[in-house]
Image (tube, rainbow, N blue to C red):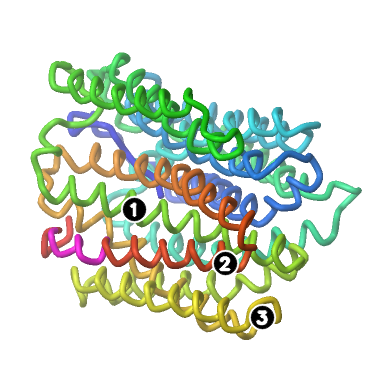
């Protein structure tokens, strides 16, 4: 999802002519789709990448976490940079960089260069995505803005369903012997199209707040703390947890402590200080972190179980994931259209409860059928899990920010989006490590069951914490 971190003092901008405004929306949606699909297809292609480039489980975790971690870290500053440097300029810069980084991923001759290209993809993506909705908001007059956003939800829902199928199909076709590389190279034509249209359609100004400032010290401490946590979590198990991994984790915690101290004294804090005085926001960060960490690990583990554990092809795996993607898409659309408004905060309880039931169903299915499991036996539990998680995607942030002031909402949404991405990287690193450690001693099915159980427990804890959120969503 997109974020906007600009302050309320931004200058008003006249909307664009209707035809040009719709072109702006097309460009922004294309960028959003590139980001969404890049994450989902990389998950499915992970085993194929590892088989081609070599390396152990650590390599696979880095390929997946490098993008989301870099994306999360870049989100922290990109909104403010949009105010300072111009949103159109940063959008086009991010789109160009993302397209070139995708090309680098597709041509990478080894795992190290692929991971480096994934980092660049994440950084450029974090520059690109937050500017998009700010550009759309100034392109349309207020009375047409809701109408403009109406097709975005269904398009994203369809992309969620199509992502695993597209990845499996591209890997199956093996175009020109490209194998897994096609999943990154497919971004090139879409990126070039978006650049061509965006160059002419995007507005020159998007209500930038030139008074905004960047807290370089705070950003540096937050970035350092995040990196110091991710590196040992990914590499520790493969290396036998040497002393330096514990030192890095401790140093990461110290860096976060210094960040908090720095924020209290900063004249231009990275995160609006008053947000941390609100119980709902602090609890919401815990819910967001736990939910997205567990969800990211769940998707990785399902792919590993089906491909590495059962030997299924990427195409078979893509089709097997259709019930999960369909459940997610259907629930997201229902939530946005009807359920979020009617159920209120109870919709979050319902979604997490349904997801827990689905995860326990997956645990039982894996235990009961073992290596003889089929697509049809997996489908019910996958659909229920996807449906439950899909109920949270739209309303979750609105309830976390339910008692935030208008001045706090933009920064709060940006922090939550960054936390979502960073939690995904931590989830892949931490639960991926748990999975591979268990698989080495007890096999893939026992490892998958363990992660399903942990994910269900995290969702259950999140369900209990939801009661501490405001009863009403941010309007």
Q: Mark 1 points at which residue?
A: 290
Mark 1 falls on what kind of element? Answer: helix
The image shows residue 261, relative to residue 448, as above or below, that is: above
User: Quadrant of the rendered structure where residue 210 is?
Assistant: top left
What's the magenta region? 462-468
Q: Is residue 204 visible?
A: no
Q: Which of marks 2 and 1 is in front?
A: 2
Q: Distance between the residues labelled 2 and 1?
A: 22 Å
The image shows residue 74, relative to residue 340, as above or below, that is: above
256 or 126: nearer the eye? 256
Q: Taking 246 as reference, is 438 left or right? A: right
User: Quadrant of the rendered structure where residue 85 is?
Assistant: top left
Q: Does the magenta stretch include residue 374?
A: no
Within 10 Å of disc 3 (Cα), the crowding (few <14, some 14-19, many 20+) is: some
Which disc, if any, is residue 362?
Answer: none
Q: Taking 281 as reference, is 45 left or right? A: right
**Residue plotted at (23% across, 41% down):** 412
Mark 2 falls on what kind of element? Answer: helix
**Residue plotted at (38% across, 47% down):** 420
Q: Taking 232 as reference, is 11 left or right? A: left
Q: Name the residue under label 2.
A: 446
Within 10 Å of disc 2 (Cα), the crowding (few <14, some 14-19, many 20+) is: some
Q: Taking 152 as reference, is 53 left or right? A: right
Query: Of all residues shown, which one is farthest toward the right?
Result: 176
Quadrant of the image containing the C terminus: bottom left
81 or 289: nearer the eye? 289
Which comes sooner in the sequence, label 2 or label 1? Answer: 1
Image x and y of residue 146, in percent:
32, 59
Q: How far apart are marks 2 and 3 (CA)?
A: 14 Å
Main SS, magenta region, reads helix
Q: Does the residue at mark 1 contact the one at mark 3 (Cβ under 8 Å)?
A: no
Q: Name the residue under label 3.
A: 373
């Amino acid at each position: 999802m997109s974020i906007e971190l600009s302050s309320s003092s931004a200058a008003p901008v006249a909307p664009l002519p209707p035809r040009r405004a719709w072109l702006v929306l097309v460009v922004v949606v294309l960028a959003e789709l590139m980001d969404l699909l890049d994450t989902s297809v990389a998950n499915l292609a992970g085993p194929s990448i590892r088989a081609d480039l070599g390396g152990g489980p650590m390599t696979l975790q880095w390929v997946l976490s490098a993008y989301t971690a870099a994306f999360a870290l870049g989100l922290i500053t990109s909104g403010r940079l949009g105010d300072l440097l111009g949103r159109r300029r940063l959008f086009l810069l991010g789109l160009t960089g993302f397209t070139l980084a995708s090309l680098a991923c597709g041509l990478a001759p080894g795992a190290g260069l692929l991971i480096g290209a994934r980092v660049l993809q994440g950084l450029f993506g974090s520059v690109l995505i937050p500017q998009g909705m700010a550009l759309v908001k100034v392109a349309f007059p207020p009375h047409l803005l809701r109408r403009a956003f109406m097709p975005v939800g269904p398009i994203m829902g369809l992309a969620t369903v199509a992502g695993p199928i597209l990845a499996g199909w591209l890997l199956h076709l093996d175009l020109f012997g490209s194998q897994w590389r096609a999943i990154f190279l497919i971004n090139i034509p879409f990126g070039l199209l978006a650049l061509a249209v965006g160059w002419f359609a995007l507005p020159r100004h998007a209500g930038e707040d030139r008074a905004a400032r960047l807290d370089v010290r705070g950003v540096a401490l937050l970035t350092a703390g995040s990196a110091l946590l991710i590196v040992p979590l990914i590499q520790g198990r493969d290396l036998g947890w040497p002393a330096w991994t514990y030192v890095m984790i401790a140093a990461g915690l110290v860096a976060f402590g210094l960040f908090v101290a720095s924020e209290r004294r900063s004249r231009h804090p990275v995160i609006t200080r008053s947000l941390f005085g609100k119980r709902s926001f602090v609890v919401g960060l815990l819910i967001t972190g736990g939910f997205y960490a567990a969800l990211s690990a769940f998707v990785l583990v399902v792919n590993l179980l089906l491909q590495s554990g059962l030997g299924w092809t990427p195409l078979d795996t893509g089709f097997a994931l259709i019930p999960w993607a369909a459940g997610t898409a259907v629930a997201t659309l229902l939530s946005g259209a009807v359920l979020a408004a009617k159920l209120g905060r109870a919709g979050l309880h319902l979604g997490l409860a349904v997801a827990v039931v689905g995860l326990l169903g997956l645990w039982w299915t894996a235990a009961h059928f073992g290596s003889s499991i089929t697509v049809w036996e997996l489908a019910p539990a996958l659909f229920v899990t996807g449906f439950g998680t899909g109920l949270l995607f739209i309303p979750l942030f609105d309830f976390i920010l339910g008692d935030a002031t208008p001045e706090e909402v933009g920064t709060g949404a940006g922090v939550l989006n960054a936390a979502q991405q960073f939690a995904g990287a931590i989830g892949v690193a931490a639960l991926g490590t748990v999975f591979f450690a268990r698989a080495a001693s007890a096999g893939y099915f026992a490892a998958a069951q363990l992660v399903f159980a942990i994910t269900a427990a995290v969702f259950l804890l999140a369900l209990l914490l939801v009661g501490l959120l405001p009863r009403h969503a941010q309007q």
